[in-house]
Image (spheres, rainbow, N blue to C red):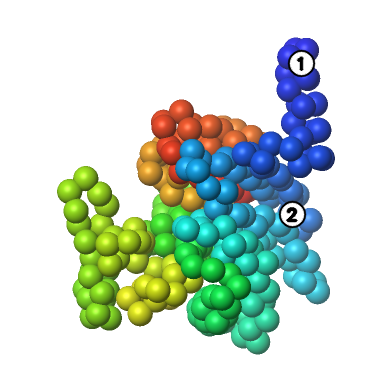
Amino acid sequence: MAGREILSKMKEKVQEKVGLGSTAESGKGKSKMSKNITHGYHLVKGKAHHPMEDYVVAEFKQVGDRELGLFAIFDGHMSHVIPDYLKSHLFDNILNEADFWTEPENAIRKAYSITDTNILEKAVDLGRGGSTAVTAILINCQKLVIANVGDSRAVICKNGEAKQLSVDHEPSTEKESIENRGGFVSNFPGDVPRVDGQLAVARAFGDKSLKKHLSSDPDVTVEMIDDDTELIILASDGLWKVMANQEAVDAIRNVKDARAAAKHLTEEAVKRNSKDDISCIVVRF
């Protein structure tokens, strides 16, 4: 290894230990049940003049004789408090549902609803604004349950083919249901469609002032992990605004280290002039 590379790696390790470089955050881990399954994440603050509004969860957790891989990206808007709250509470609420192990999809839907209600009830403390979410729960390294509200996205790669597992909740595609709730979707020239002229996603946690016209119901998808499964990417729209699903998969298929893969994708998004906060988790199989 060249001297410059060694110095760079030493600097990264020092920054991780002392928490420097608040504009970037990295981490990695692996499954105890299957040593072949690893994860890594990387976040980069965007160019907006406000605190970082993306938060991630990425960990393997032992629950009795079972193992759960818990992965999530929470992308706040007008708030870094609400995505931080989600990071601390959403998975706990999901796992506290009595039917999680038998009906995980139902448990996730109920927990999303309960968590949103809690956020709205605590609006005085948590403030205005809201957050999108994409969550992935890997059960015993075999069953993957994806849920999302908003436009953070989950993509799986099997045999080199990218497949989107989440749904981008855009105001233009949910215009009818927004109008049925009494809201409207603006479409001003030079701007993206927005709920009530304000929010560029049709579903989110929080956003108390818009809640009558917004949904927090997640789309939930179940995918079984098989021998063809190569990797999963979870990322905020800071990545997906500038990169297609297949492009992202192609860019990291041959990067064996999951954290290096996540970092590569965030760096590529920055190169493509993404101005938003960019957060990315890669799980390799």
Secondary structure under the numbered disc 1 in the rendered image:
loop
Q: Residue at x 23, y 70 (%)?
A: 184
Along the polypeptide, which appears first: circle 2 or circle 1? 1
Q: Furthest-left residue in view?
A: 189
Q: Is residue 91 visible?
A: no
Q: Is residue 206 visible?
A: yes
**Residue named by callout 2:** 31
Estimate how packed mark 1 is, as few (under 14), some (14 to 19) or many (20 or more) residues with alpha carbons within 10 Å: few
Dividing the picture into quarters, in which one does residue 194 lie? Answer: bottom left
The percent position of residue 93, horizontal first and vertical second, equals 64, 77
Real-space Cα distance between discs 2 and 1? 28 Å
Q: Furthest-bottom residue in view?
A: 98
The percent position of residue 146, horizontal first and vertical second, equals 51, 64
Q: Is residue 153 left or right of residue 88?
A: left
Q: Is residue 41 left or right of residue 112?
A: right
The percent position of residue 276, horizontal first and vertical second, equals 46, 43
Q: Amino acid at mark 2?
A: Ser
**Residue named by callout 1:** 1
Question: Foreground: 123 or 25?
Answer: 123
